[in-house]
């Protein structure tokens, strides 16, 4: 009897990293990479389409960051396990990703053997964290489902759609580009922009961008097009 392999979607914006991860995982007989995403929005779309067992997700991605992509994936396809693989190990990121329901969190210095083992563990329904993170989580809370939205709003005070709009604006997209990316009207984007500024008491795009960087919605290294 042939055992079905664990299907994996790789969500990582750096092509060379995706290629490396795929090459490593292809050596595992029980793991199959069935798709690759280069941004968070594509990760959500491909997860809906391909229904992988596990999504290996980076946090810092364009168009839609890994935190929001994880939230959307787990809301729509809760059976899919999300395993974070990131260069970031800040407590703020870890707290959010646990509250959102991710199954594990690995830092990118992780070896190939640990990554494949983590994929197997989260597929079984277990959690898996890099050793350095596990130590910090030893006395950590176990978030209840109702805590997810509370914690998310504690950090941002914004709706899911507002976070999406904020990220796109902060990455330098004009209203027309943001509207096209989200499939909404320009007037709706303008309304979201107004609401963001009102909620955050911020009065210009540069201020929104600084807020997005400070809260981890985008990285400071993102190439911005603000004039």
Image: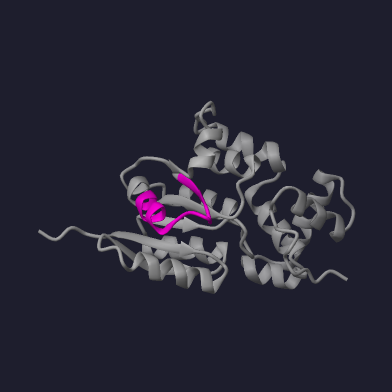
Q: Position of residue 194 (x, y in %)?
A: 82, 54
Residue lying at 31% horizontally and 67% vertically, measured from the top left: 27
Q: Is residue 106 visible?
A: yes
Which region of the structure is painted magenta? 104-119
**Quadrant position of residue 58:** bottom right
Residue lying at 53% horizontally and 26% vertically, measured from the top left: 139
Q: Position of residue 121 (x, y in %)?
A: 34, 46
Q: Quadrant of the N terminus?
A: bottom left
Residue lying at 53% horizontally and 65% vertically, measured from the top left: 12
Q: Is residue 101 visible?
A: no
**Quadrant position of residue 65:** bottom right
Q: Quadrant of the C terminus?
A: bottom right
Q: Position of residue 43 (x, y in %)?
A: 50, 63
Q: Position of residue 96 (x, y in %)?
A: 59, 41
Depicted 50 relative to depicted 163: above or below: below
Q: Is residue 31 left or right of residue 168?
A: left
Q: Is residue 91 left or right of residue 98?
A: right
Is 94 colored magenta in this rendering? no
Q: How is the image coloured?
A: one colour
Viewer-closest of 210 and 140: 140
Going by the picture, which residue comes out furthest to the left?
Answer: 1
Viewer-closest of 57 and 29: 29
Viewer-closest of 222 and 131: 131
Disc count in the image? Answer: 0
Is 117 colored magenta in this rendering? yes
């Amino acid at each position: 009897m042939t055992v079905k392999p664990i299907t994996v979607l790789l969500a990582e914006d750096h092509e060379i990293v995706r290629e490396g991860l795929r090459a490593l995982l292809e050596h595992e007989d029980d793991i199959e990479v069935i798709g690759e995403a280069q941004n968070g929005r594509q990760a959500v779309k491909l997860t809906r389409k391909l229904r992988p067992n596990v999504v290996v997700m980076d946090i810092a991605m364009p168009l839609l960051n890994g935190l929001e992509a994880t939230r959307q994936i787990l809301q729509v396809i809760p059976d899919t396990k999300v395993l974070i693989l990131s260069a970031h190990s800040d407590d703020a990121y870890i707290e959010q990703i646990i509250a959102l329901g991710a199954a594990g969190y690995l830092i990118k210095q992780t070896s190939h053997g640990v990554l494949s083992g983590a994929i197997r563990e989260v597929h079984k329904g277990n959690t898996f964290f890099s050793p350095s993170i596990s130590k910090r989580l030893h006395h950590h809370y176990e978030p209840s489902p109702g805590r997810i939205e509370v914690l998310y709003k504690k950090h941002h005070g914004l709706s899911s759609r507002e976070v999406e709009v904020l990220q796109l604006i902060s990455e330098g997209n004009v209203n027309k580009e943001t509207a096209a990316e989200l499939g909404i009207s320009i007037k709706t984007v303008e309304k979201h922009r107004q609401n963001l500024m009102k909620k955050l008491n911020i009065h210009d795009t540069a201020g929104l961008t600084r807020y997005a960087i400070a809260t981890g919605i985008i990285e400071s290294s993102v190439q911005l097009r603000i004039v």
